[in-house]
């Protein structure tokens, strides 16, 4: 790459002279994140690029070109539609529908009470049960959710964070009920609490006990559930909160480094838990910026894991990631346009080397998706996989002057953030200082100003609008009776279970939380006794306390 043809500089200067005679349209040429884009990229933009050091071959360090040697020629990405609503019974029907239509993995969406650690009959749950995801109060609900779905045959991702340990234990216990041993289970729990403090805001406990729960999961899984991805370090929600692509990249990887350091501090060998760390990124609408983001992420992670944290197992160097197309790019206006947006975003994720993918449905900006809308979203992936030919070649954009220059720029800008985070005392200190939150808020404000001034066009919203447009698509509505049925089933469970055993297991969990033992075996005992999520979380709240965010203005 360093031996460029001698005539390129002279040729570029001559081209520029002729180019200047041509007037550009009145438009700001930059990425969706506000990064300036040149009009032309040549070998001069990547003259410092060293193939072996910076790119290498797919499946080989530093993994810029992909984490596996044969990528999609060996196995397509997992098509994993995020789904869950109403009760476990209703969601079970949707899962079977998706599997029947060709989905290759499940991804569970939980309702807000479950996400916040409240049972469905808690006063704070009123009106929220089953609205934005499925209500899971106990092992009984989890058994219903996966009834007829063999857990040794399907990989399941669960988007749950603060109560991740409890929900994970329910899944393990459900497997036991099916006769599936823990070592056979495959899937992922999101379990990314740092991102909650930064962006999504669905925390329960303060950072220190939250990090303890995560490292307890690392330790327990490495011995008992070895195929499970113990955390999905999520940039998705950081981007949905309004960050730029660079911020998503930098803040997500900084969180990943913090989890690695926490595991090492807890006495774990980095190679015992790092191979099961996974990531979750957003696929936004700026095609090349997203591809460069994924390629830079793999390279940064591999270098840090090998050079800073001393990981010896090559699996610890791999940044494996799930992608979801950008919910924040969808519009309520002209919702059919969202099908097209999602297709382009999915293409960027695949060309960027994702391991699994969720494509948003056109109606998700309005409600949970209907069956028709979710089928279109799934078919979008299937057309991409089987008709377009993009899965035939490994990392087909490698060597593009623009893509490689943009990948380098993403890495360079991310490193600046890593330096700033370290200077401020690390991730937890930056959360306390509201550094991440302010950076994201500023980026979101700049983006909105660009829309308001029409410096950035959003089709159907600030340009190409239909003044007489009427919403004519079907919307999924959750029957209010669902909440009453869920509460009745929960209260019946409490009457019929062995409440003496429940109290014993909860008390044992309390003692474990007060001490230093790994709490996972104790949570499992509570779950097996049919203690509810809310009862288990309440014990932990009483010991660990609750987190209160410092306001920023």
Image (cartoon, rainbow, N blue to C red):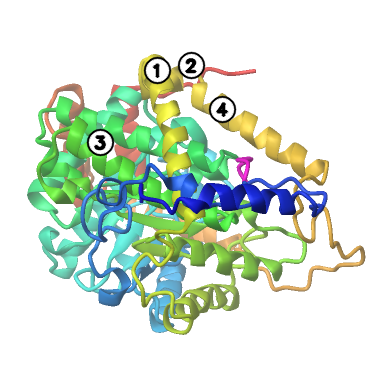
Mark pair 3, 2: CA separation: 25 Å
Would you say the residues marked 4 and 2 are in contact, meaning their CB atoms lie under 8 Å apart? Answer: no
Mark sitting on residue 433: 2
Q: Which residue is mark 3?
A: 304
Callout 1: few (<14), some (14-19), or many (20+) C-alpha neighbours within 10 Å?
some
Q: Residue at x 39, y 22 (%)?
A: 419
**Marks 4 and 2, Cα distance to the nearest angstrom?**
11 Å
- Residue 439: assigned label: 4
Q: Between tags 1 and 3, which lies in front?
A: 3
In the figure, is residue 355 to the left or right of 84?
left
Query: Of callouts 1 and 3, which one flags the residue occurring earlier in the amino acid sequence?
Result: 3
Indicate yes or no whether the magenta region holds residue 405.
no
Is 485 situated above or below 165? below
36 part of magenta stretch: yes
* Whether label 4 touches label 3, CB < 8 Å: no
Callouts 2 and 1 close, C-beta under 8 Å: yes
The answer to whether the residues at label 3 and label 2 have Cβ atoms under 8 Å apart is: no
């Amino acid at each position: 790459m360093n031996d460029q043809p001698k005539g390129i500089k002279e040729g570029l200067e001559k081209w520029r002279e002729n180019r200047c005679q041509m007037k550009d349209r009145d438009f700001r040429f930059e990425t969706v994140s506000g990064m300036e884009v040149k009009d032309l990229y040549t070998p001069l933009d990547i003259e410092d690029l060293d193939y072996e050091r910076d790119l290498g071959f797919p499946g080989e360090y530093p993994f810029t070109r992909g984490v596996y040697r044969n990528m999609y020629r060996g196995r397509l990405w997992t098509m994993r539609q995020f789904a869950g609503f109403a009760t476990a019974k209703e969601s079970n029907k949707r899962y079977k529908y998706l599997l029947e239509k060709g989905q290759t993995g499940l991804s569970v969406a939980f309702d807000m009470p479950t996400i916040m650690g409240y049972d469905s009959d808690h006063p704070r749950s009123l009106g929220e049960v089953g609205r934005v995801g499925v209500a899971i109060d106990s092992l009984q609900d989890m058994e219903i959710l996966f009834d007829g779905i063999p857990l040794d045959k399907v990989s399941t991702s669960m988007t749950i964070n603060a109560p991740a340990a409890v929900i994970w234990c329910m899944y393990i216990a459900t497997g036991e009920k099916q006769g599936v041993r823990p070592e056979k289970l495959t899937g992922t729990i999101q379990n990314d609490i740092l991102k909650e403090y930064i962006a999504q805001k669905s925390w329960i406990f303060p950072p220190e006990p939250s990090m303890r729960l995560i490292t307890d999961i690392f330790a327990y899984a490495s011995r008992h559930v070895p195929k499970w991805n113990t955390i999905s370090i999520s940039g998705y929600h950081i981007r949905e909160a309004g960050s730029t692509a660079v911020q998503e990249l930098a803040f997500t990887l900084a969180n990943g480094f913090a989890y690695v350091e926490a595991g090492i501090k807890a006495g774990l060998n980095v190679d015992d838990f790092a191979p099961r760390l996974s990531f979750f990124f957003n696929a936004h609408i700026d095609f090349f910026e997203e591809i460069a983001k994924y390629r830079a992420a793999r390279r940064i992670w591999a270098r840090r894991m090998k050079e800073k944290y001393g990981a010896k197992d090559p699996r610890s160097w791999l940044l494996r990631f799930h992608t979801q197309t950008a919910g924040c790019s969808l519009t309520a206006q002209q919702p059919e346009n969202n099908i097209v947006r999602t297709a382009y975003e999915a293409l960027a994720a695949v060309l960027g080397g994702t391991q699994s993918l969720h494509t948003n449905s056109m109606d998700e900006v309005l409600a949970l998706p209907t069956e028709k809308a979710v089928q279109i979203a799934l078919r979008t992936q299937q057309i991409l996989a089987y008709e377009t030919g993009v899965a035939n070649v490994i990392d087909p954009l490698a060597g593009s002057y623009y893509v490689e220059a943009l990948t380098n720029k993403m890495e360079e800008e991310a490193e600046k953030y890593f330096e700033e985070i370290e200077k401020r005392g690390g991730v937890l200190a930056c959360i306390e200082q509201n550094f991440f939150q302010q950076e994201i808020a500023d980026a979101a404000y700049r983006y909105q100003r660009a829309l308001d001034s029409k410096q950035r066009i959003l089709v159907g919203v600030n340009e190409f609008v239909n003044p007489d447009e009427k919403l004519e698509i079907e919307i999924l509505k959750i029957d209010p009776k669902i909440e009453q049925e869920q509460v009745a089933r929960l209260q019946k469970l409490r009457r019929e279970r062995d409440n003496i055993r429940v109290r014993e297991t909860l008390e044992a969990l309390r003692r474990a939380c007060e001490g230093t033992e790994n709490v996972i075996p104790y949570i499992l005992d509570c779950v097996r006794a049919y203690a509810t999520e809310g009862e288990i979380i309440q014990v932990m709240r009483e010991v660990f306390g609750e987190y209160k965010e410092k306001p920023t203005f």
